[in-house]
Image (spheres, rainbow, N blue to C red):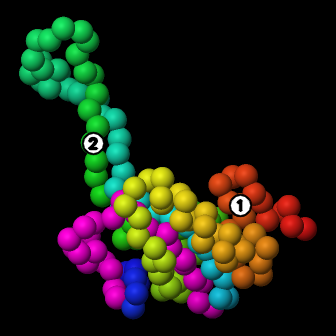
Amino acid sequence: MWLYKEKEISSLEDFGDEVPFGFVYVVTHVPTGKKYIGKKSLFSTQNKKLGKKELAEQPVTRGRKATKKKVTKESDWKTYHGSNEEIIKLIKEDKQSEFKREILHLCYNKKLLTYYETKFQFIYEVLEKPSEYLNSNILGSFFNTDFI
């Protein structure tokens, strides 16, 4: 379960009429107090190859026939805790109950999702405070090792 403005979010319907593209979040490991700020998309899109039947059903047109189609499905956001190695290790040890998951900001497109993730990481100085945050880099360009 995620928390957003003191409200529990556990399904897409909990977001209301307009479902966002994704959100920026903070995950806190309660026993240590360490946090991780990241982003999560609510949907994933993949290119799926068309089967023989789908290829045969395509109308005859000029040019090439499509061999793939885009398929969008709901992501694993309900059970997601972050991409940090320490967090993943604890989740594999079945310690999900040790985490508090909060949504900081809802975003309605991919570009703003990346922007707000970066903004919050800089605001909270995640790289400058390694004793408080588990983040090791921002955008793969700025690293906590730069501050040592």
Amino acid type, callout 2: Val
Q: Residue furthest top?
A: 62
Amino acid type, callout 1: Asn
Residue at 63 percent of width and 79 percent of height:
35
Quarter of the image for residue 3 reads bottom left
Residue 17 in sight here: yes
**Magenta-span inclusion, residue 65:** no
| Residue 137 tag number | 1
Label whose residue precedes the other's in the sequence (1 or 2): 2
Residue at 73 percent of width and 52 percent of height:
141
Instruction: Give me the C-alpha separation between circle 1 and circle 2.
Output: 31 Å
Query: Residue 78, image x and y in percent?
Result: 36, 70
Residue for badge 2: 71
In the image: residue 8, left or right of residue 105: left
Residue at 61 percent of width and 67 percent of height:
119
Query: Residue 94, image x and y in percent?
Result: 50, 77
Query: Residue 107, image x and y in percent?
Result: 41, 64
Vertically, is 118 above or below 102? above
